[in-house]
């Protein structure tokens, strides 16, 4: 009689990671819903308000470089508990904000640091799955897309029923309970259990002698080209993600429809993550990433042409597909370019580059609006940078080292 297969605890890890992504990354991506309510009450400029989000992105990216190493040393339970406490407390304190420095501390530092879960969660999931690593990574990362789909509508309803301050209180309480409690069930790898991973194949993915260290990768042209295109990508996506809600309401579209447009981006993100993202195994990671970059450029040009509501929803579908595709490809491309030996720290640098662009973009776009009273120049700048990103993607090729010249 064959031995009964033991349940793989990795599925518990994946479920917890999915909901953590949905709450923390999903919430972080829909800051634009709070934009006008905060400005209306506190009478700040869009540059100042965008700056808090920009600062949170910088903190998010900086932590991504080191937090993977903390995860390796202490495990995801401690790392996620600390992230949940910081983010939950940050959202609670946002309900009391009165001054600019408070917003930059509560949202920029506490929520930015607390939301830095991308690298540790994906690193943990990668340890639990070998044969299903790509599929499970896409499923877990789709949690962010689900958050972007659901949360704009929920938050808009909460703000309408109560106000933005009460909404921050509710969100902070939910994060403290859900993230901190579920983090206690996280385990770093199958070695912490009484059995080995069930789905790991014989001779599964392994480190190769030709893999690059961070120092070796940083000496290549490809490393810096990919960092540059990720800065452009982050600038484009989050400039629009943060300012699309105020933009469409500025031209007379209702706040409810603006929330629906953001939700559509979230829904299309899920399709991009699970559909286009999974295509990387067949089409190649670079080719699939290039498809996403082209779709991003098309989305921005659709936005520039859009005045009717239906065009904004077409833009939202394209934007979500591009984000889901490119963000899912980021980790596989890091492995494709430089191998697995220093994958975590290299991915941390990739993530940081994206967040540098994501920090600068909304700030620059807010400043352009404050000076010109319009987002048109900002969106044209995004279109130009999207084209630059497409060109850089085409030019990126796998580097050749003394170890892999025959690959």
Image (cartoon, rainbow, N blue to C red):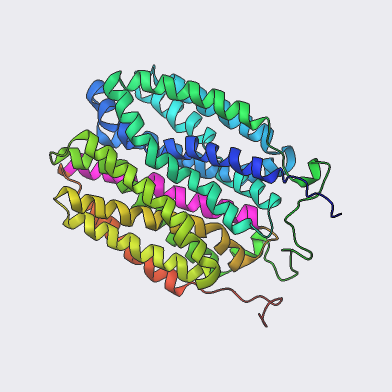
Residue 357 sits inside the magenta stretch? yes
Tell me the quadrant of the picture where the C terminus can be found.
Answer: bottom right
Question: Which image quadrant for residue 77?
Answer: top right
Can residue 230 be spotted in the picture? Answer: no
Residue 155 can be seen in this image: yes
Q: From the viewer's side, name the closer residue of 235 and 314.
A: 314
The location of residue 398, given as percent across then percent down, is: 57, 73
Q: Is residue 56 above or below residue 316?
A: above
Magenta span of residues: 343-371
- 136 left or right, relative to 150: right
On the rendered structure, is 109 left or right of 378?
Answer: right
Residue found 26% across the figure and 44% down from its top: 244
In this rendering, position of residue 272 left or right of residue 363:
right
Above or below residue 121? Residue 103 is above
Instruction: Report the side of 68 relative to 56 (left or right).
Output: right
Q: Which residue corresponds to the image point at 80% horizontal and 45% vertical from the top-left?
A: 191
Report how many numbered discs are placed on residues in the image: 0
Nearest the viewer among 42 and 173 is: 173
Please tell me which residue lies in front, 395 or 81: 81
Q: Residue visible at 30% across and 30% down?
A: 156
Percent across and percent down for residue 399 are 59, 74
The picture quadrant where one finds residue 387 is bottom left
The outermost residue toward the front is: 1
Q: Residue furthest bottom?
A: 406
Residue 152 x/y as whole percent: 34, 36
Quadrant in which the N terminus appears: bottom right
The image shows residue 61 at horizontal and vertical percentages of 51, 45
- The kind of secondary structure the magenta stretch mainly shows is helix
Residue 315 painted magenta:
no
- Identified at 46% across, 59% down, the residue is 275
């Amino acid at each position: 009689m064959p031995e009964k297969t033991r349940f793989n605890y990795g599925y518990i890890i994946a479920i917890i990671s999915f909901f953590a992504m949905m709450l923390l990354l999903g919430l972080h991506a829909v800051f634009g819903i709070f934009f006008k309510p905060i400005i209306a009450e506190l009478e700040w400029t869009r540059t100042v308000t965008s700056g808090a989000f920009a600062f949170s992105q910088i903190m998010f990216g900086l932590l991504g470089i080191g937090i993977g190493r903390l995860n390796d040393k202490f495990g995801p339970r401690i790392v996620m508990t600390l992230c949940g406490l910081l983010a939950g407390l940050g959202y609670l304190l946002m309900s009391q904000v009165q001054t600019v420095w408070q917003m930059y501390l509560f949202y920029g530092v506490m929520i930015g640091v607390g939301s830095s879960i991308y690298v540790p969660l994906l690193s943990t999931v990668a340890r639990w799955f070998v044969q299903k690593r790509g599929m499970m990574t896409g499923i877990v990362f789709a949690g962010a897309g689900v958050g972007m789909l659901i949360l704009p509508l929920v938050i808009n309803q909460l703000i309408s029923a109560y106000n933005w301050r009460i909404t921050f209180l509710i969100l902070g309480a939910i994060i403290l309970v859900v993230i901190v409690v579920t983090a206690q069930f996280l385990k770093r790898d199958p070695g912490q259990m009484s059995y080995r991973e069930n789905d790991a194949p014989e001779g599964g993915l392994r480190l190769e002698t030709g893999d690059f260290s961070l120092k070796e990768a940083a000496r290549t042209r490809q490393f810096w080209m990919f960092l540059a295109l990720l800065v452009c990508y982050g600038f484009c996506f989050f400039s629009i993600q943060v300012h699309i809600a105020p933009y469409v309401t500025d031209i007379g579209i209702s706040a409810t429809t603006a929330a629906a447009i953001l939700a559509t981006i979230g829904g299309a993100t899920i399709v991009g993550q699970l559909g286009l993202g999974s295509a990387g195994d067949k089409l190649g990671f670079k080719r699939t990433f290039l498809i996403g970059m082209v779709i991003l450029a098309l989305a921005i040009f659709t936005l520039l042409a859009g005045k009717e509501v239906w065009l904004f929803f077409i833009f939202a579908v394209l934007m979500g597909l591009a984000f889901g595709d490119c963000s899912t490809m980021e980790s596989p491309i890091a492995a494709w370019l430089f191998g697995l030996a220093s994958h975590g720290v290299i991915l941390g640098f990739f993530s940081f580059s994206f967040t540098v662009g994501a920090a600068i973009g909304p700030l620059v776009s807010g400043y352009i609006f404050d000076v010109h009273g319009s987002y048109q120049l900002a969106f044209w700048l995004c279109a130009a940078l999207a084209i630059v990103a497409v060109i850089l993607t085409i030019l990126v090729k796998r580097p050749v080292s003394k170890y892999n010249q025959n690959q």
